[in-house]
Image (cartoon, grey):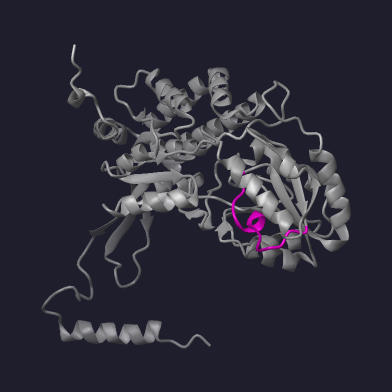
Amino acid sequence: MTIDETSIPTDRDRVEDAVRRARHAARWWGGLSHDDRKDWLLEFKSVVARNSASLVDVVREETGKPADDALLEVMLAVEHLTWAAKNARRVLRERSVLPGLVSANQAASVRYEPMGVVGVIGPWNYPVYTPMGSIAYSMAAGNAVVFKPSELTPRTGAWLADTWDSLSAPHPVLQTVVGDGAVGAHLARAGVDKVAFTGSTATAKKVMATCAESLTPIVVEGGGKDALIVDEGADLDAAAEFAAFGAMGNAGQTCAGVERVYVVDALADRFVDKLVARVTNLRVGDAADAQYGRMTLPRQVDVVRSQVEDALARGGRAVVGGPESVRPPYVDPVVLLDVPEDSEAQVEETFGPTVVVNRVRDLDEAIDRANTSKYGLGASVFTGSDAAGRRAADRLRVGVVSINSVLGFAAIGALPFGGVGDSGFGRIHGADGLREFSRVKSVTRQRFSAPLNLVTMTRKRRDVAVARFLLTKIHGRRRR
């Protein structure tokens, strides 16, 4: 029998068909009340939670991360799904606004309406938690979602869509299309109303260029080169414990993890000793008791090796590990000291279990060095002074700051997440995340004729004279 190749759906066909079905689903979903959508979403999260063991197994098989880490990821995703479902009505309700003196005859309000269909392009490092920040908030805002997971984690993406389908909803509000970067490009060109992208800055620029062809709006969560600062009075045990987790957890494959540490000189030796003690004997591999697993993206191993070798060649010192730590598909912990600020390990995203610790004179120098990065996703500050912590939070050029912890924001549904610079723009999570996937509409209603009718082709001289008087007397008053 001869196969008619023209009858085989192409990637573009699959994507466009999914978007067409999503468009129909969006009309139903967007027409529901917030309470009805909340009920569907809370049932969705309940099914995810009840079947989390199955999802954990899929995540573990696809990424290589330990089961405990996969479970934590699912728990965080469920927390955000719950927050979005329960708070969408409050955040997105229509609000009246004061019209001001000139428009006192108008009643004014702001509405937040569903956009329609959102295309979500997700990453491989946290294939449930990260895309759920766009999926949950998009759906809670009344949109249908077409999700393109990483080609490294397709079964995780399919699991989420299949779980939604298991609710027997009348329409496919959440669909998954799998494939490589070309599928993501097709999704960006398929007429979706917004794209939510998480991934490398380089790929984000390509997706943005594709979206620009049709002026499709996009929210981007790009890479990071997050710094952890250890200031005077800091709890060094806590700082070292969090630094170890932020740098080595998930094999360092965390966009908002810890890649740079700046320690005030007086505390540096003691901090390094504590950090070394915590990472030297970490268990790496696929065993059930491993503390982190393989590098999910094979070519990332070469990036780690290159940065470690460059740091050592530039005068840095390895106090844990070194080039020999790279043993594909695993990378053992690497701690580097005294690495030049313009080295690859300090400038480029590593996305591996390595960390650079450099000494600084004081908190101000640490902040200045942290802010030199082209990235600006997150940062952590350990200090014994509340005032110093607040000052650092004010000055750090990042989207999120954790004081005396690392990733302190991750489970807080009300906090928006996103970065600046090469770390992207726009926000997911929180009220800002719900509004990110909403279309803002301003509405006015004239309640009575304007006392001063200036919106006419036949203005009266009296009205213009009164308007000129009010402008001068009300807005022209000296403030000092």
Looking at the picture, how far across and down is residue 270, in whole percent?
Answer: 88, 52
Asked if residue 343 lies in the magenta stretch, the reply is: yes
Kindly identify the residue that appears in the image at 60 percent across and 28 percent down: 64
In the displayed structure, does residue 75 sit left or right of residue 383? left
Return the residue nearer the eye: 19 or 287. Answer: 287
Looking at the picture, how far across and down is residue 58, in whole percent?
Answer: 53, 22
- Whether 448 is drawn above or below 74: the answer is below
| Quadrant in the picture for the N terminus | top left
Quarter occupied by residue 241:
top right
Looking at the picture, how far across and down is residue 69, in whole percent?
Answer: 64, 30
In the displayed structure, does residue 144 sit left or right of residue 122? left
Residue 254 visible in rendering = no
Quarter occupied by residue 463:
bottom left
Kindly identify the residue that appears in the image at 57 percent across and 57 percent down: 376
Asked if residue 74 lies in the magenta stretch, the reply is: no
**What is the magenta segment's predominant secondary structure?**
loop
Residue 465 visible in rendering = yes
Residue stretch in magenta: 338-351
Looking at the picture, how far across and down is residue 83, in whole percent?
Answer: 51, 37
Return the residue nearer the eye: 375 or 137. Answer: 375
Return the residue nearer the eye: 387 or 51. Answer: 51
Kindly identify the residue that appears in the image at 33 percent across and 43 percent down: 185
**What is the residue that sits farthest to the left in this orientation?**
458
Quarter occupied by residue 33:
top left
